[in-house]
Amino acid sequence: MVLDLKLIEYDKALEVQKGLFNGVRNGTVNSAIVFCRHYPVITLGRQAKSVNIKADQAELARRGITVRQSERGGDVTYHGPGQLVVYPVVHLELFNKDIHYFLRTLEENVIALLSSFGINAAARKGLTGVWVGEQKICSIGITVKNWISYHGLAINVSANDLKNFSLIRPCGMDIKMTSMETILKKEVSFSEVQKHFIKEYKYA
């Protein structure tokens, strides 16, 4: 099952994920992949430290950015309309009952997707996500309960939505984020990115 929720509030997308999670758990849904883009939101993963949000509440409010606690792994990240967010809801027992393998496979999917656009990306040993040189282009953070995954990954597509990363220490690190448009120096279609992700996706 593939769902495209378009531009949606983070909380509403989470409700959809949890509904699909329950469907996979009770057997009415085999697996699902949810695509969406979010209104500006900072999410705090299970390992997050509040000090990694560098802006105060007044500045976040001025920019229209909400903050949400999340069950996903990882530290602090930002989601905005310039990202393609992908939420795989998968019963890992039906594929490979290995969370690290699942994470590495998602990284490989994104690397192959970016390669199809002419972007040379790679994973980094000991870290989760996808990088282009010294800059990060995709963040990954999942939750697995009863061997069913939800939450997922965010690919930076638009160059216009990178400035809000300056308000945080992405993933708790002093790193610079990049985007597909920044690298390619041209506009990139979200629908094309989505199509290429589905082509490389291995859990459907």
Image: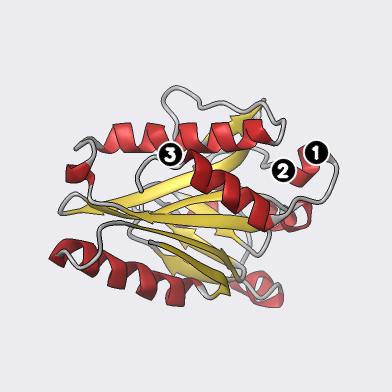
Judge from the rendering whether residue 60 lies leftward or rightward of residue 110; answer left or right.
right
On the image, numbered disc 3 is attached to which residue? 106
Q: Quadrant of residue 11?
A: bottom left
Callout 3 secondary element: helix
Q: Residues within 10 Å of mark 3 (few under 14, many from 20)?
A: many
On the image, numbered disc 1 is attached to which residue? 184
The label on residue 10 is none
- At horizontal 50% and vertical 25% (from top left) the residue drawn is 124
Q: Is residue 113 shown above or below 46? A: above
Q: In the depicted view, which residue is nearer to us: 31 or 157? A: 31
- At horizontal 66% and vertical 76% (from top left) the residue drawn is 64
Going from N to C along the chain, the mark reached first, 2 or 3, is 3
Q: In the depicted view, which residue is nearer to us: 107 or 73? A: 107
Q: Quadrant of residue 175?
A: top right
Contact? badges 2 and 3 (CB < 8 Å): no
Does residue 53 appear in the picture of this structure?
A: no
Callout 2 secondary element: helix
On the image, numbered disc 2 is attached to which residue? 180
- Amino acid type of the residue tagged 3 in the rendering: Leu
